[in-house]
Amino acid sequence: MSARRVLIFGGIALIAGGMLFGDIFAVFVLHQNSGQTGEALLAASRAAIMGNSLAVKDSFLHIGGLLEDHGTKVDAHVHMIGAGYLALVLSLLQPYLALPQTKKRLLAWWFVAGGLLLPIGIFLIHYVGLAYSPSSVIGWASVLADSAGAILIAVLVVEAWAFWKHFRSGNTVIEPALPRDRSWESRILLSGGTLLVLLGFLYGAWYAAIDLYEHEARETRILKSMLENASSRQSGEARAVADYGSLAGEKAVKIAAHSHIIEFGLLAILLSFIQPYVQLGEIWKRRWVVVLLAGSVILPIFVPLELRMGLLAGGIADTGGLMVIVALVAMLGGVLRYSGSLDAATGGQK
Amino acid sequence: MNTAQKVLIFGGLTLATLGMLYGLYYALFVEHQTLDRMGGSLTAAFVYAAEGHLPDADSSIEAYASAKYDYVRQVDVHSHWIGLGMLLMLMGAIFDQAAFSVRMRFWIAVSLFSGAFVFPLGVLLQTLSHGAFVASALAILGSVLVTIALGAVAWGLAVKGGSPETIQ
């Protein structure tokens, strides 16, 4: 298998795996975790009102664990998909790297391995903790994640150097670039993807200008009101905790909408390049493109609507995510069926 | 491959590497300590409140808010540099299909790269001095540059309408 195919196959597999993990997390963990965090915060507020500082510390220890559980799962999801995107991007650069095929292939395998180990390490951080660790802050799972990250950086540095060397040596063609695919699927993915990225940018700018600072100020205000209630031994903690939960939900869905619309846009652009590698019937290729783009629009639209429509919007958003995953897995199947004819010219194994 | 494409692809690789290096440094030397500081401040605030010391509780909440302000932006720097790096590489790959002159393509590529570098840099500088005008101005300038340049690319691709050969 050539370096390009390793990166394409590995990249799509990492993206599909990361998305599936994200969907499972959203359905089975996210809401339950948020509910438990709210309960723990309420318990901390009540303990503070009762003047029980030991119970306050216990509650925050519990909250710390819940937030770590939530954060590491989100990070595992994001890093797995991010590594997959980078693998696909690097597959496009392979013809412009001044390296022999064997080294390119080795680097590709290292990159895919690093992209797999990084999220696994992040996922394990919550469960392994500081067990048997010589450090007081970093456990073995963090070491695994950081080492995997270092592998990814090393591969990127070598490939950047090889890219530079390629142009310094006079643009010698080492292997053919991906054929220019102007099929309907490629054009729709390219234009749809660019539009999604642009919309995501505009939404992000809107969020940064209108919501970011207001959310930060509101969080401080709510926490201070909890403390004032506790200090003066007054009730009202349930309302404050509910406000805090609403704020956390509002922040989460707006950031999720921003990041997902851009990620899906990038994915669509990337997939437009690898359509020659997807060996499916033309009608099915088109169907999967439509499913992918529809899911890419549905998820970011319905995630913010969760605030108004509740679980119904959440369910529709999760379905949108699932549509993207299914289309991606279908394209992965097409890549698997690919005969390898494009690689023949590069000496890759069919 | 033309100069604009080289700027975008090499710039993208550099930004992605920079974002990852920053992420690795952050994970090793900053993140755990910042999270401990945030958790510690929040716990201390509620403990002070339980003991009836409201001024101390308020100052602990301010410390928590300050640590969280830094944390959110530091994580954003890592993700935005890598994300924009990938976007630059992708734009590099499709740039020959955009309906612009060679000179215009070069300046759009420079705008994309400059914006992609400056935007997260401005966000990072905000953590050194909260609310600093220069840092916020850099972040806004960078994001505006990237958005306008990306809009231009989208327009260039749409106008081209699938006939890249005509501009070669």
Image (cartoon, coloured by chain):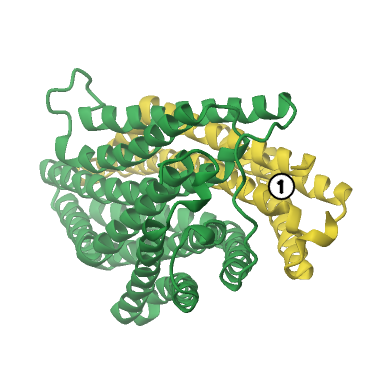
Chain colours: A green, B yellow
Instruction: Confirm whether residue B56 shows in the render.
Output: no
In the rendered view, does A239 fall on the left or right side of A134? right
Give amino acid for label 1: Leu
Q: For residue A245, which quarter of the picture?
A: bottom left
Of A279 and A298, nearer the camera is A279
Question: Which residue is painted at 43% across and 26% down in the image?
Answer: B25
Q: How many numbered circles are shown?
A: 1
The chain letter for the residue carrying disc 1 is B
- The percent coordinates of residue B90 (x first, y second) are 61, 50
> In which quadrant of the rendered view does residue A235 lie?
bottom left
Residue drawn at the location 83% of the way across and 54% of the way down: B168
Tell me the quadrant of the picture where the N terminus of chain A can be found.
top left
Name above or below for residue B166 compared with residue A7.
below
User: Is any atom of residue B49 visible in this view?
Assistant: yes
- Is disc 1 placed on a helix, strand or loop? helix
- Left or right: residue A100 versus residue B89 is left
Q: Residue at x 21, y 50 (%)?
A: A66
Q: Residues within 10 Å of mark 1 (few under 14, many from 20)?
A: many
| Above or below, B57 relative to B157 | above
Q: Is residue B30 above or below residue B117?
A: above
Q: Nearer the viewer, residue A222 or A319?
A: A319
Task: Work out whether residue A42 or residue B7 is closer to the camera in this orientation and state it.
Answer: B7
Residue at image mark 1? B112
| In the rendered image, the vertical position of residue B142 relative to residue A111, given as above or below | below
Whole-percent x, y for residue A228 in the image: 31, 54
Q: Does A188 sit left or right of A109 as displayed?
A: right
Q: Residue furthest top?
A: A134
Q: Position of residue A120 (x, y in %)?
A: 26, 41
